[in-house]
Image: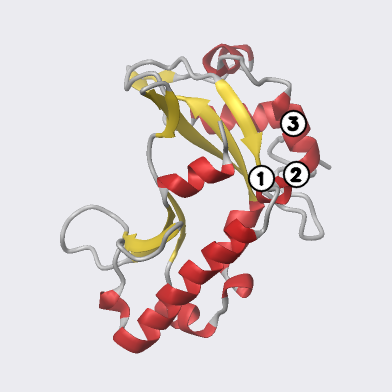
Amino acid sequence: MVTRVVAMRNLEKYIGQDLSELAAKHGITTYKDGKQNKGWKGLTLEHLAGLSNDNKQAPNGLGFELKSTAFYKVKGVWTPKETFAITMINPKYLIETSFFESHCWDKLKSLVYCAVTWNGKHNVKSELLKVESFDFLESNTLIQEIQADYEFIRYKLIEQGFQSLTGRDGKWIQARTKGTGHGSTSRAFYARKCLIKEIIKL
């Protein structure tokens, strides 16, 4: 059984190494039919963490998920490349559910964040920089502030309705449209870049 702590220890052995080279060693293709295989980093990280198809989730609530987050340097400072979707928003569920009972918190606390380098669209070189999770944060102030964001968005939904939810709300997490096109009405909780940077301090 691979627990989160074991997975993190396994991954930490590969910090500073190029994932594309490790992918090749594990028989994972980075390019397929002339196009970059989108899932190759995730598959490689799973292998390095010691996960296989039959033991991806540990029992007794010890389940976790690996999340690779790309960083690149801006004026010498490591910066997250993009936000990431945490979980879809179901209005009825959000109205009825406080933060620590929510899918949003379940997902955030279950993630093992793997910071990797981004070296351009067609460059598969990607070095593992750091491995982190909420379990190892030094302060719970961040969690309290994320809770405040969630509850603000929740009460806005109750008071003003689903269409009032906008990506402008929230310091660390935001509720914004998911999917492309102006006709999209579904929304998801997203982790802002500042949250990713705060969790993975490089």
Q: Nearer the viewer, mark 3 or mark 1?
A: 1
Q: Position of residue 174 (x, y in %)?
A: 39, 61
Question: Eyeballing the image, is 28 above or below 89?
Answer: above
The tag earlier along the polypeptide, 3 or 1, is 3
Q: Residues within 10 Å of mark 3 (few under 14, many from 20)?
A: some
The tag earlier along the polypeptide, 3 or 2, is 2
The tag earlier along the polypeptide, 1 or 2, is 2
Camera-nearest residue between 152 and 18 = 152
The residue at which mark 3 appears reads as 50
Q: Is residue 72 left or right of residue 164?
A: right
**Amino acid type indicated by mark 2:** Arg
Q: CA separation, marks 3 and 1?
A: 17 Å
**Amino acid type indicated by mark 3:** Gly
Quarter of the image that includes the N terminus: top right
The residue at which mark 2 appears reads as 4
- Say which element carries label 1: loop
Q: Position of residue 74 (x, y in %)?
A: 36, 26
Question: Eyeballing the image, is 117 above or below 132?
Answer: above
The residue at which mark 1 appears reads as 133
- Say which element carries label 2: helix
Label ID, residue 91: none
Q: Is residue 102 left or right of residue 184?
A: right
